[in-house]
Image: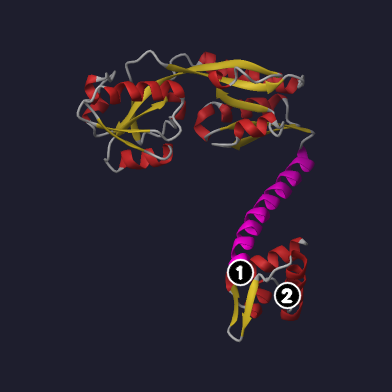
Amino acid sequence: MTTKQIDYCIELAHTLNFSRAAENQFVSQPTLTYQIRLLEEEVGFAIFERSGKGASLTPAGAQFVGFLTNMREDLKRAIEQGQNFSAKYKDSISISMPVRQAVYFLPEAMRLFGQSHPDVQIIPKFQYENGMDDFLKEETDILFTLKELTKQIPSIHVQDLFESHIYLIAQRADSLAEKNLVTDADLYGRTLMVGGGSPPALRAVQHRLIASGKINYFNSADHDTTLTNVAAGRGVCLAPGFLNDHSGQFAWIPFDCSESFSCVLCTHKDDHRDSLRTFIDLLKKLYKDAVAFPL
């Protein structure tokens, strides 16, 4: 299977017309038809049904093209990264985090690091679910995670980055947004969204509130769904401070509880690069200096 065949197949799946697909790919129709036939022979099943009106995807073809499209996007990104790397950099450091805002000072750290190490590329990877697995397979160099999740992992260095607290997220027009500190009692009679992959410390607080029998609640699939529900006025939620993007869209009010999150950076024990150490030290200093920054 060649990249040309992949492109032809994806284009034909989009247009369902051999002539138009060939035109869009700047090849003759016989060439495109021949390459599609070769691809079908290689995979061993019909991707398209032919008719006088053009083409339609078979059930197997529809599934196959979905995989091809994702694979082509991954390949495109890999090529772009390779082009960027070969043109300027001699080394790279990848850092995995669940969402962009988790490491708020990452852009500033990248800027400062680039001044002293212009030939080392910092590659952020946003992996809400597979970050730990990829790190353990040594597909990333640094992992942002919670300290409690690292206790049974061998052969890694764990370095404290910052302590994050629990906040209530509400619409800015909500009366709770005027408070400097929200307590359990402030949420009585309110609807609280829970679930969505909440870490243990947050689940403990949610369960305590639910056990009071004085709040309404419903489960939310993930953090983005929860924020959408907050914006729609369906309720409020509790979240770790490290998820705050500081955009000002919502009010983030400190919640009165003892639970917090120890946010750390993990590196591989056998990675002794000076550039890695420098970059991590930069990040740690930025957080240490930002003593008044809400986390």
**Lower position in the chain sequence, tag 1 or tag 2:** 1
Judge by depth and name the residue closer to the eye, 250 or 207. 207
| The N terminus - image quarter | bottom right
* Colouring method of the image: secondary structure
Q: Quadrant of residue 4?
A: bottom right
Where does residue 146 sit, x and y in percent of width and height? 54, 22
- Secondary structure at badge 2 equals helix
Judge by depth and name the residue closer to the eye, 19 or 294. 19
Tell which residue pokes out farthest to the bottom in this image: 52
- Span colored in magenta: 59-88
What amino acid is labelled 1 in the image?
Ala
> Which label number is shown at residue 82?
none
Badge 2 density bin: few <14, some 14–19, many ≥20, Cα 10 Å:
many
What amino acid is labelled 2 in the image?
Leu
- Secondary structure at badge 1 equals helix
Considering the whole magenta stretch, tell me its main secondary structure: helix
Query: Circle 2 is placed at which residue position?
Result: 32
Q: In the image, 155: left or right of 129?
A: right
Is residue 254 visible to us here? no
Which residue occupies 74% across, 67% down?
A: 44
In the image, residue 159 lies in the stretch drawn in magenta: no
Which residue occupies 61% across, 69% down?
A: 13
Q: In the image, 7: left or right of 191?
A: right
Query: Circle 1 is placed at which residue position?
Result: 13
Judge by depth and name the residue closer to the eye, 84 or 18. 18
Q: In the image, 212: left or right of 60?
A: left
Q: Quadrant of residue 113?
A: top right
